[in-house]
Image (cartoon, rainbow, N blue to C red):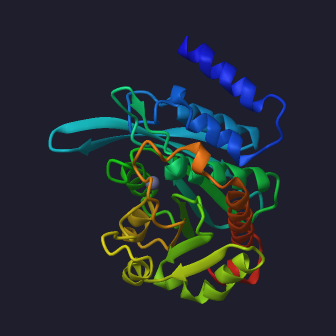
């Protein structure tokens, strides 16, 4: 019955509509997806849904299974969705890895946590990047990772980084909570090693009406956002990459008063702004994977 309801929902939202971020977010936040709880023995239906979207855009997709421990005694299985757009050239630069966690808080009793901003927004934008870059001639692989068990301690990202071993990665771009709400502000925190790209990153957002602010220090970011309690370096999936000396840029819209409440729902999302954010990040990714000065001056 559940599956029938889900298929009907998917047919309804996908049927005639042209592509929109709203469609993917509506599916991911629907009650049938039960708040996308972290980890389970089998991949959650949201992981299957994300897989199908990536496959539509011609990517090779697989689940990465991992085990994680949480609390004092509990352990569980998790599943990252890993989708690869491969560089087809004779010589390719090192890959970039784009991450967005798909898990959220699940259900508590009869209440379901939709997790629209956290982080259906990041997942939808990641899928939109894959859509916009399909068929593009790229000079490095793009590895998209929809991570699981972020909410329980960044476990999906940790497992992914661990499995990389010695493999060289050019950069991690992490997307978590991209809804600009009424503030119209987007923030980024980047590794200090990416300082040479500062002007280039900022340039990407100049053509939009989004007020963009880039930080290289989590402490300064917390101060500017008047959120001294948040450690922006450790707050999301970019942290395991940072720990492994992989340069990262984390994009997010800062504090959300509905964070981790049932009110983090689809009706709060500003889709016009989210589309602008998605297009700008896509444009930025494109410059990183094209044979530009920026891409070719590094590995
Ligand atoms: Zn999140």
Q: Nearer the viewer, residue 10 or 42?
A: 10
Q: At 30% across and 35% down in the image, what residue appears?
A: 76
Q: At 69% across and 72% down in the image, what residue appears?
A: 288
Q: How many marks?
A: 0
* Left/right of residue 109 with respect to residue 134 in the rendered view: left
Q: Indicate the position of residue 63 as horizontal and vertical percent values.
A: 52, 38
Q: Indicate the position of residue 109 as horizontal and vertical percent values.
A: 33, 27
Above-or-below relation of 136 to 104 = below
Q: Nearer the viewer, residue 122 or 289?
A: 122
* Left/right of residue 30 with respect to residue 151 in the rendered view: right
Above-or-below relation of 117 to 241 = above
Position of the N terminus, as image quadrant, is top right
Q: Is residue 275 visible?
A: yes
Looking at the rendering, which quadrant does residue 78 occupy?
Answer: top left
Q: Is residue 91 visible?
A: no
Q: Indicate the position of residue 164 as horizontal and vertical percent values.
A: 46, 57
**Ligand 1 - quadrant of the structure image:** bottom left
Position of the C terminus, as image quadrant, is bottom right
* Left/right of residue 75 with respect to residue 257 in the rendered view: left
Q: Nearer the viewer, residue 223 or 83?
A: 223
Q: At 62% across and 77% down in the image, what residue appears?
A: 212
Residue reaching furthest to the left:
72
């Amino acid at each position: 019955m559940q599956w029938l309801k889900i298929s009907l929902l998917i047919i309804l939202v996908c049927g005639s509509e042209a592509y929109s971020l709203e469609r993917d977010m509506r599916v991911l936040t629907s009650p049938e997806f039960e708040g996308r709880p972290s980890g389970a023995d089998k991949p959650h239906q949201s992981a299957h849904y994300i897989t199908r979207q990536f496959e539509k855009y011609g990517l090779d997709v697989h689940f990465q299974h991992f085990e994680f421990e949480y609390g004092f005694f509990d352990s569980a299985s998790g599943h990252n969705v890993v989708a690869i757009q491969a560089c087809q050239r004779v010589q390719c630069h090192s890959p970039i890895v784009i991450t967005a966690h798909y898990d959220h808080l699940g259900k508590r009793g009869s209440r379901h946590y939709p997790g629209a901003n956290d982080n259906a927004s990041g997942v939808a934008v990641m899928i939109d990047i894959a859509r916009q870059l399909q068929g593009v001639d790229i000079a490095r692989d793009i590895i998209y990772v929809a991570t699981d068990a972020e909410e329980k301690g960044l476990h999906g990202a940790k497992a992914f980084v661990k499995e990389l071993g010695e493999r060289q990665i050019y950069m991690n771009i992490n997307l978590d909570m991209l809804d600009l709400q009424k503030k119209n502000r987007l923030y980024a925190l980047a590794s200090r090693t990416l300082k040479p790209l500062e002007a280039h990153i900022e340039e990407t957002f100049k053509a939009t009406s989004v007020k963009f602010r880039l930080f290289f220090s989590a402490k300064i970011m917390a101060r500017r956002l008047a959120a001294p309690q948040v450690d922006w370096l450790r707050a999301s999936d970019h942290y395991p990459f940072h720990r492994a000396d992989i340069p990262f840029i984390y994009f997010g819209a800062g504090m959300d008063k509905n964070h981790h409440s049932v009110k983090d729902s689809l009706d709060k999302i500003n889709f016009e702004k989210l589309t602008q954010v998605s297009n700008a990040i896509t444009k930025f990714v494109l410059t990183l994977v094209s044979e530009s000065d920026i891409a070719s001056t590094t590995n």
